[in-house]
Image (cartoon, rainbow, N blue to C red):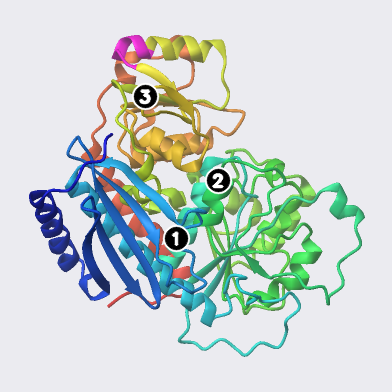
Amino acid sequence: MKIIKMDAAQEKQLSQSLSDALDRNNLRQHLKRVWVFDKQILVVDFAYRNVHFGFDMTPLSDKKVSIDLIKRDRSQTSFIITSAAQGKDRLTSSSVPDEAVALVVDKAIDLINRIDHHYKAIEDGFALPVSGDMHIHGAKNKAPRADTKPHKVGIFTLPLGRNYGGILQAYALMKTVRDLGCDPILINRRFADKEVLLTPERDENDIIPAITNKIDMEVDLETRSFIENNILPISRPFRTSAELKKNIADYDLHAVISGSDQVWRAKYARGLLKDFFHGYLDPKDRRIKRISYAASFGADQWEFTEEQTKMAARYAKLFDAISVREKSATELCREHLGADARHVLDPTLLQTPECYRLLFADRVKVAPGRRITSYILDANPEKAQFMNKISDQLGMKIVAANRRFDSAGTLTPDRTVEGWLVDFYQADFVLTDSFHGVAFSILFNKPFIVFSNPIRGLARFSSILGLFELEARMVKDVGSADLEALLTPIDWIKVNMRLDELRHQSIEFLRNALEIPPKT
């Protein structure tokens, strides 16, 4: 779209809309100035706690606006406004003026909140390693944490990598814990590799940053940038239980949380299973609260060996609070671990659609025609034939997730987390066999059909669908599927009311488990 010069009427309209939005959101106190650059770009500059940033709002020929987030040169702090080499991020390539103003306000609020958390992290010892300001492995005898400071909370989940749902649930849980007033850190427990197993333990005097902003993936993936920009801070990688046990005290944690995702599924957790039951902690030391949030066994049948069951039961008795993602898991905990567990929402559903929209606003494009987004993990000819039948019935084209339209209307690959989210956000209908495919269809209010996936765990689907009375959306046998029932419109008002109720209950579980007093 062609950039045009900003006339007086456009400047007045944008400036007035922006002024009203700043006043409504109490942002004027952080505004430095609003001005027009080169008769084309409306520039909005902010300053907060010595962090300077701005937004360039550029009018386009179709009466829409593009927005860039800019790092101002005078920002000499450790806070990262943008990791882009050119010092700016495109937030949206084309939005109507009101949406553009709303995006500027939302992003400014988000940055101000992140700046506050950044400085709290520095005060509490969770600073990221910049300008030589590192917290070194082996630093002992820290001063005790004052009760007035935010609780530090360690989050344990399956190693982040290719799995979009796994990444987004980690993001959502970290954000929810932070929203409760705590300082979360992702404890980066990775799978051991041969090199680690053959290498002697590091000397305790080795200089190893305890906290970083790198995930240390085994291979470079398109998901890395999302993790390293949005799931911070991250601990140093731990590839053995012995390493973790030796160094966990360095983080001065008030609580540790296992979850979410299938952290309690033995064949997925493998050598990490004991750590996901917090077995790295001294059983006699009860100062750190042991919590699970939406931990999943992945199946409604018990899959642990006898030895694994004894281990899990022993450590489960030390937990301060246990919650699970599937309803069937409450009975598995009671029967095999001798523990009571609460059924809660997957972390992705604790956040609102607006929270995710901020993550991908720059990737939303006007797509030609209505579309079915397909996200299929286990493809087969029967599913493909059924999906084509749905496509014909609805008169919509099927577009696989992780592909989006470029400016020329051509489908191009986009395997980023943000791109995956956009595919669900812009879908008119969803076909999936993924748990988190269902979760985001519900969150974004997209009609969907889910193929049951017994190999990966059927309990996961029946549980989330049951919460919202959407069991009729699941296909167990494509040959006998009832198309009329599957395509019945969903009562989204009813679903959203139920989601609000479950979200409140789940967040209250976390609040109580972390001993966070309710807001008065």
Q: Residue at x 68, y 49 (%)?
A: 217
- The residue where tag 2 is placed is 166
Q: Nearer the viewer, residue 164 or 484?
A: 164
Mark 3 surroundings: few (<14), some (14-19) or many (≥20) residues within 10 A: few
Residue 129 or 471: which is nearer the viewer? 129
State the CA–CA distance, disc 2 to disc 3: 32 Å
Residues drawn in magenta: 390-396
Amino acid at pointer 2: Gly
- Residue receiving disc 1: 175
The amino acid type found where label 3 is placed reads Ala
User: What kind of residue is marked 1?
Assistant: Lys
Residue in the image at 60% along x and 75% along y: 253
Q: Are marks 1 and 2 in contact (CB under 8 Å)?
A: no
Instruction: Estimate the x, y position of residue 314 in percent, counting from the top left.
Output: 71, 62
Q: Is residue 115 magenta?
A: no
- Main SS, magenta region, reads helix
Quarter of the figure with the N terminus? top left
